[in-house]
Image (tube, helix red, strand yellow):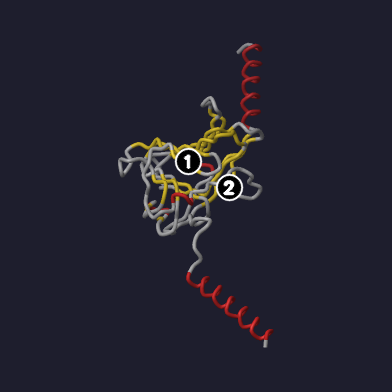
């Protein structure tokens, strides 16, 4: 191999590692400053199957590119029972974007480019289909991708409504599209998928009632 060829290879390698060093895989919300995945508008008790485009607050557009979806009508953007084999299942109050198929991907497209994006995720463990997250710029150029199965697997055996945070962070605001692919992969805004403005549980409401009653009694005592 000539010196010129070796030098060219080193330059290409240095560029690759320089680009790679600009990105990081996030597995925690600590220090996260990206957009929140606000799905409360779709917490209406329905699956809301869709291929999109569908708006999500914060200047985000959802689209589905699922292959062989169970419904034939796209991906889930709402609520309803959803099985993930060894990683458990979802339902009840959980609101999520779910691929609802063995392959393909979902996209979150941003009106304004961001430097990071992440959400609480889970998937159906399937060795035949890699579970991936990827960031693209406005020209459709891949900026970074991660195979979660190998580098940050999610393991929630027999759990119900259990999600783990995953995302991609760059040093510059170049991300215009965030893709999630792989068997039945899904994303939610919170660790249990519950809407952030969920109605308090009955027990919580009872405590609120007791507090109000105590306050009223205190006011009466002061007057007397």
Mark 1 or 2, which is nearer the eye?
1
Few, some or many residues within 10 Å of mark 1 (<14, 14–19, 20+): some
Residue that protrudes farthest toward the bottom in the picture: 224
Query: Seen in the image, is 191 located left or right of residue 24?
Result: left
For the point 31% across and 44% down, which residue is it? Answer: 70
Total count of labels = 2
Q: Which numbered disc covers residue 27? A: 2
Instruction: Return the x and y of residue 208 as percentages of the image width and height.
Output: 56, 73
Q: Which type of secondary structure does the marked residue at label 1 adopt?
A: strand
Q: Which numbered disc covers residue 55? A: 1
Q: Which numbered disc covers residue 82? A: none
Vertical side of 94 occupied by 66: above or below: above
Q: Quadrant of the C terminus?
A: bottom right
Instruction: Return the x and y of residue 166 as percentages of the image width and height.
Output: 54, 45
Instruction: Return the x and y of residue 145 as percentages of the image width and height.
Output: 53, 35
Instruction: Return the x and y of residue 26 as percentages of the image width and height.
Output: 59, 44
């Amino acid at each position: 191999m000539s010196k010129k060829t070796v030098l060219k290879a080193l330059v290409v390698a240095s560029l690759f590692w320089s680009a790679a060093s600009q990105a990081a895989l996030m597995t925690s919300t600590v220090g996260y400053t990206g957009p929140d995945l606000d799905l409360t508008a779709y917490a209406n008790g329905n699956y809301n199957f869709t291929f999109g485009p569908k708006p999500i607050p914060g200047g985000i557009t959802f689209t589905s590119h699922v292959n062989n979806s169970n419904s034939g009508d796209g991906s889930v953007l709402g609520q309803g029972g959803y099985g993930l084999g060894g990683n458990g299942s979802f339902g009840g109050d959980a609101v999520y974007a779910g691929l609802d198929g063995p392959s393909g991907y979902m996209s979150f497209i941003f009106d304004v480019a961001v430097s990071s994006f992440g959400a609480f995720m889970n998937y159906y463990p399937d060795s035949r289909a890699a579970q991936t997250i990827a960031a693209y710029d406005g020209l459709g150029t891949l900026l970074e991708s991660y195979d979660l199965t190998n580098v940050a697997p999610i393991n929630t055996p027999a759990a119900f409504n259990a999600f783990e945070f995953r995302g991609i962070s760059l040093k510059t605001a170049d991300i215009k599209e965030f893709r999630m692919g792989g068997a039945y992969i899904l994303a939610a805004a919170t660790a249990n998928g519950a809407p952030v403005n969920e109605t308090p549980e009955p027990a919580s409401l009872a405590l609120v009632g007791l507090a109000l009653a105590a306050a009223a009694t205190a006011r009466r005592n002061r007057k007397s």
